[in-house]
Amino acid sequence: MRFSIFSTRATQLVALVVLASICHFSYADSSYDAEGQRRAQSAGALLLGKPGPAAVLKTIDGQEIDLSTLYGKKPIYLKFWATWCVPCRQQMPAFEKTQQTLGDKIQVIAVNTGFSDDKESVIAYRKEHGLSMPIAIDDGSLAADLNLRVTPQHVLINRSGHISYVGHLDDQQLHDALQKLLLPETETAAPPRDEKSAAEARFAVGDQVAGLKATTMDGANVDLAAAATGKPRALVFFAPWCEWYLEESRPQTSKACVRVRKEVDHLLTQGDVEWLGISSGLWATQDDLQDYLNTSKTKLPLALDANDELFRAFGIREIPSVVLLDANGRVNKILGPQDAQLSSAVQALR
């Protein structure tokens, strides 16, 4: 899925027609599949051959799956997905078939991204699609370990515990990689990763922010610990595709993204707060942000959080969200998608 947003009215109409086609016809027939595969494989290139993550996943049924206990014993198939994701929905029948045919030989796990999703939606989705594999909801840490960039994203870990494949499509390449997992291996078991997950460092209301930086699209380096001007700061967490891609699958979220953008553009004119838009790296690049700027005409300075490190630092799992920092860089308030008191919260911050 290529999240380009076009600059002219005519091409916007064409884009909407294409998007409608995606929702009603086979995803494999669209031009978005190659872009999704490119993004997934580019993100996974540095992972291939490396040890799988030492993660313990808790399923929606309350069970725990310790990946490190499977290394050396059984291959693993992790599939990242979201309930609002069109190609995820289209791939689900084949994913369930993989569980039915290979589930006794490969540990299949459906990993919901936890990004603008909730447990109730996941449970309903499981029932709708008749899914029988274990389902876990990520808190962002596994996505960080495995460079999640698109949905769906397939990650295969061989029996010895090494990452052997990363992709986006349900195609022959994926199925060949799955069959390869069943072959005998001579590699020794991979040691678990011992790096501290970036998802562990969170700043809550009242905490002093430290060690967080962002780079805007015009190349300015921003230290989030405190505004250079001594003003309070507002961080708007969003995705450039929220307004249009979620219009049908998550209409309330789409409307919230539009509402917050318009409200922020108004508040920007008052000049007594420093604003920064922080885009998730999920299905977003610098080019996508530029397209968003061209189309929305927002004056909000934007930065790409390519690895979602800033999202995890503040525990942001829904878009749009706004984090308000006082002039000393302390977290004053965190507003979620349905919080409608942004203006009053900013007023109280001054």
Image: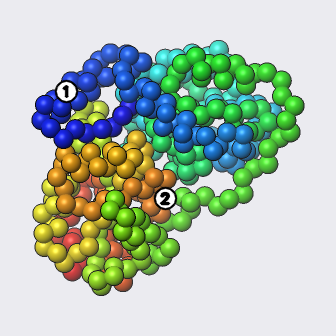
Question: In the rendered structure, which amino acid carries the disc numbered 1?
Answer: Val
Mark toward the viewer: 1 or 2: 1
Residue 323 occupies which quadrant of the picture? Answer: bottom left
The residue shown at (60%, 49%) is 145
Question: In the rendered structure, which amino acid carries the disc numbered 2?
Answer: Glu
Residue holding disc 1: 14
Chain-order first, disc 1 or disc 2: 1
Work out which residue is located at the far front of the displayed protein and give it. Answer: 219
Residue 133 occupies which quadrant of the picture? Answer: top right
Q: Position of residue 226 (x, y in %)?
A: 37, 80
The residue shown at (45%, 32%) is 36
The span from disc 1 to disc 2 (Cα, nearest Å) is 34 Å
Q: Is residue 265 left or right of residue 338?
A: left
- Give the quadrant of the N terminus: top left
Q: Is residue 254 visible?
A: no
Q: Is residue 36 visible?
A: yes
Q: Is residue 251 left or right of residue 119?
A: left
Secondary structure under the numbered disc 2 in the rendered image: helix
Q: Is residue 10 left or right of residue 143?
A: left
Q: Position of residue 194 (x, y in %)?
A: 72, 57
Local crowd size for mark 1, using a 10 Å CA cut-off: few (<14), some (14–19), many (≥20) = few
Local crowd size for mark 2, using a 10 Å CA cut-off: few (<14), some (14–19), many (≥20) = many
Q: Between 330 and 304, which is closer to the camera in this rendering?
A: 304
Name the disc covering residue 287, or none: none
Q: Position of residue 202 (x, y in %)?
A: 49, 66
Q: Is residue 281 left or right of residue 17?
A: right
| Tally of numbered discs | 2
Residue holding disc 2: 309
Residue 205 occupies which quadrant of the picture? Answer: bottom left
Q: Position of residue 95 (x, y in %)?
A: 54, 21
The residue shown at (44%, 69%) is 213
